[in-house]
Amino acid sequence: MLISNSNFMNNNAINNLLTETLIILRDLISFKTVSGENNLEFIDYCEKKLKSQGAKTIKTYNNKKIQANLFSTIGEDNGKGIILSGHSDVVPAISSDWTSDPFIARDSNNKIFGRGTSDMKGFIACTLAVAPLFASEKLRTPIHFSYTFDEETGCLGAPLVLNDLKKKNIKASACIIGEPTNMKVITANKGYNEYITHFTGLSGHASNPEAGISAIEYAIEYSNKLLELRNDLKKRSNGKIFSPKYTTLQIGKISGGMGANVIADQCSLEWEVRPINKEDSDFVNRSIEDFTKKILLPKIKKNNPKGNINKVVIGEVVGFDQEDNSYATNLICNLTGDNSKNTMPFGTEAGLFQNAGISTVICGPGSIDQAHTVDEYITYDQLRNCLKMLISLREKMI
């Protein structure tokens, strides 16, 4: 075995692995894998690393073939493997806001700075660093590495991976989602639904308001209905394990119009729902659709047959439900010694893996407080703790 149970050998091995992890993480940060943009160089880099350890790899692509998921396996598949899952995409970063280039890693005070360090290239770097350890011994069950695209914008990549695994009859007993949790065990998260509603009115001069139809005014009525639903959601349900304990609804952006003296013929409203259960998600969609079809749209059509309201689904990601006696949760609690079993108010890919019949848990290095921030960083200690967990996992699999 490359890793001994002695503290001395473990510490030395972990320090060596940390050095390798930091090298890999610096490389990963340099790939500008902003959501919606090309991630193929990133995926090719990861695939090369894993193939060098004898991994079998599968890629699935988006329609434009500019984004890919990577699913790799070390060991013989027996349907009982464990998946280490992370997303390749990061949110945008404005260089002028940062102390240094967000896509060039910077080390300071035992921290490494760069876009995606916490969310969640730090975890991916750890998994790549330990891959040679998994490959060095005959595993009783295989280890899988799953790297997806566009998690940040609706979890668009993961469903392609899961559909492909189903077609190929590749099964797994557990999935570890390495989102930044400070290595705390997370057993549930809310769902995430994102929408854009487009309003089409009739342009005209503001001096004659009767001659036009303001798309903005109808967007305001629609917004008021959403705010009414938001209050209803607080009364509807009580998700005791979450904070806040209810389904949230938020209007994030409204855009439209040309100026104060022009009746706006176009307006768009961007909004989201973070449901604690499917019933709340259905309630919001059903209520806003009824309001639109029965009240708001007829008012627009009455004055302009070409007027319209169109709700576009950007993403609807199922929540991750807490399970009793979860295999994945028990496994990671045992490996980390953390039994807190916390929850998250934001969406992840965990619910997708869970719905595919795979016992799932969330646990990874870094703090969610750093995710998406200017001068995002991850501490060396967090990476070290993640490596310890992965080494312990490997020891259970040989």
Image (cartoon, grey):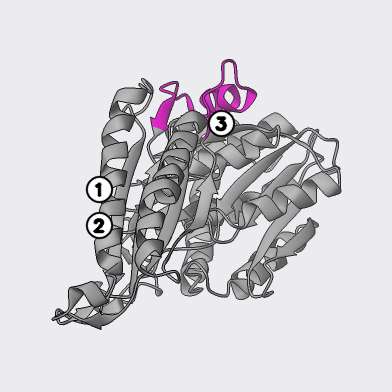
User: Which is more toward the observer, 140 or 66?
Assistant: 66
Quarter of image, res 51 = bottom right
Q: Is 275 situated left or right of 63 in this image? A: left
User: Which is more toward the observer, 272 or 65?
Assistant: 272
- The reply to whether residue 164 is visible in this rendering is yes
Question: From the viewer's perspective, is residue 196 above or below residue 290?
Answer: below
**Label 1 environment density (alpha carbons within 10 Å; few <14, some 14–19, many ≥20):** few
Kindly state the secondary structure of the residue where label 2 is placed: helix
Question: From the viewer's perspective, is residue 304 above or below residue 176?
Answer: below
Q: Is 37 situated left or right of 197 in this image? A: right
Disc sitting over residue 224 in the figure: 1
Magenta segment boundaries in residue numbering: 320-343
Question: From the viewer's perspective, is residue 365 above or below residue 70?
Answer: above
**Label 3 environment density (alpha carbons within 10 Å; few <14, some 14–19, many ≥20):** few
- The reply to whether residue 4 is visible in this rendering is no
Q: Earlier in the sequence, mark 2 or mark 3?
A: 3
Kindly state the secondary structure of the residue where label 3 is placed: loop
**Quadrant of the snapshot with the N terminus:** top right
Q: Is 363 situated left or right of 298 in this image? A: right
